[in-house]
Amino acid sequence: MEQENSAMEQENSAREQNLDVVIVGAGFAGLTAARELIRQGLAVRIVEARDRIGGRTWLDHRLGRELEIGGTWVHWTQPYVWAELKRYGIGTVASPEPERAFWWADGGRREGAPGTLLDLIGEFNGQFVKESRAFFPQPFRPLATDAFKEIDHVSVQDRIRDQFPAGTARDILESFWALNFNGPLEDAALTQALRWVALTNGDWAVNFEACATYKIHGGTAALAEAMLKDAGAAIDFGFTVAGIADDGGTVSVRGTDGRRLSAKTAIVTVPLHVLERVAFEPPLPSAKAEGARRGQVSRGVKVWIRLRGQHAPFVALGHADWPLNFFQTEYTLDGDTIVVGFGPDATKIDASDAAAVQAQLARLLPGVEVVDVATHDWVADPLAGETWPMHRTGFLTNHLAALQSAHGNVLFAGSDLANGWGGFIDGAIESGMEAALDAASLLTPATREAAPQQSPLR
């Protein structure tokens, strides 16, 4: 045992020497930053608490096939992820075109053609988001002007209720945006909603298409694995970060199991709800710490549902307060149908309970039989604490710039902090590229020239 401990200590000591950058997290932000920095000749190592790469994307075998348990959809209006797909020759696969639509409005269940539901959403949403480009004229630079500060205190719920009377319009819009935020709307920032739509030039329909239509061929794992292979980065799995100390010359990253790595700088890519669990020395500035403490609105659920029998592809939108308020057909398998569902509050339903899930789906599709379900509680997951990140009111004004800024030699990245497509894979990649640029600027040309070769991929 003593020999094993000694060997481990020697291995850890060797790893601590001559590292330029330690990257915390092997999601898309971390993988992007690692690849970009290694290409510049820098010595990089990734530490990852999970036993896999991908972060809040996770392709896993469930219900008889590979399913995306976390983040899924991409779109050509998302320049960073689209460029990566082209770089590695990876295509996309469209979700099936719905043939039926079900929705809840004005106290009752409705059924009709998908175009009817989309027309309703479009009519009301067109009014709701019409000022998106006025407040965000440069969507990938949300802080470029102060225009957004006029409305950054306003919640999505307050704006909808001020703008639309009780009834169909309000019901549909509140459910639509509860779906997008994957959380309750009372503290959901109107600025976040308008930022999203500004990214598609104010066109809500293209934005909706970007959210839930095109999946990566081979799954998100195909892209993550291609990026890791390209980078050739070494990863220490099972490394949960407990603390990060910066003495002005060296950044030391300490794991909960006692492992340590040291480098000239570090890039931290964990979600906001995880960031506050890391002990920083010196402590984070108040605006950064408060932004992490407040966290994001998203605290919802994603569940995969296997229905008995083949059902024509459908889309279904329930009430904003329902435990599951959106369903969409994705696959057929061995005579059954696989549907994906979302709800705004993970505490309102045990999504691993097939009977509970069926009760929610039956509100819109009476008579369906749920055979099995598959889910992951991202909110309860200590390595996530949220689903996809969606900002609270006041976040842009008070926290985004602070959270993006360096803390000495410690940098930050992730979809939570993206300027553009925050909440998407695209935003994670964008943020990782920004962090890589910042990290390289902290290191002198002499440091880059002297950087040692990387350890082989493990």
Image (tube, grey):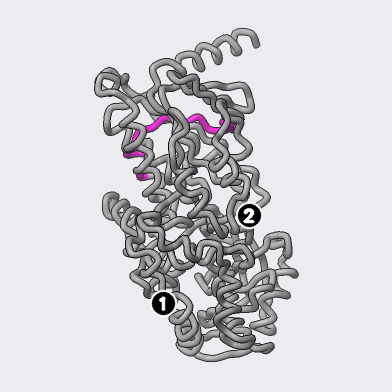
User: Which disc is residue 130 wearing?
Assistant: 1
- Asked if the residues shown at circle 1 and circle 2 are in contact, with their CB atoms under 8 angstroms apart, the answer is no
Q: Which residues are magenta?
A: 226-241
| Crowding at mark 1 (Cα within 10 Å: few <14, some 14-19, many 20+) | some
Q: Is residue 310 visible?
A: no
The image shows residue 407 at horizontal and vertical percentages of: 47, 33
Q: In this view of the protein, which residue sits in the foreground, 255 or 390? A: 390
Residue at x 54% of width, y 41% of height: 288
Q: Is residue 183 visible?
A: yes
Q: Is residue 84 left or right of residue 118?
A: left
Give the alpha-carbon distance from disc 1 to disc 2, as whole Å.
36 Å
Q: In this view of the protein, which residue sits in the foreground, 220 or 312? A: 220
**217 above or below 280?**
below
The image shows residue 289 at horizontal and vertical percentages of: 58, 40
Badge 2 is on which residue? 376
User: Which disc is residue 342 wearing?
Assistant: none
SS for callout 2: loop
Q: Is residue 130 left or right of residue 303?
A: left
Q: In this view of the protein, which residue sits in the foreground, 244 or 163? A: 163
Q: How many marks?
A: 2
User: Tag 2: residue type?
Assistant: His
User: Tag 1: residue type?
Assistant: Lys
**210 above or below 23?**
below
- Find residue 137 and report its image quarter: bottom left
Residue at x 49% of width, y 62% of height: 192
Whether 248 is among the magenta residues is no
The image shows residue 206 at horizontal and vertical percentages of: 38, 73
SS for callout 1: loop
Q: Quadrant of the N terminus?
A: top right
| Crowding at mark 2 (Cα within 10 Å: few <14, some 14-19, many 20+) | some
Residue at x 52% of width, y 50% of height: 398
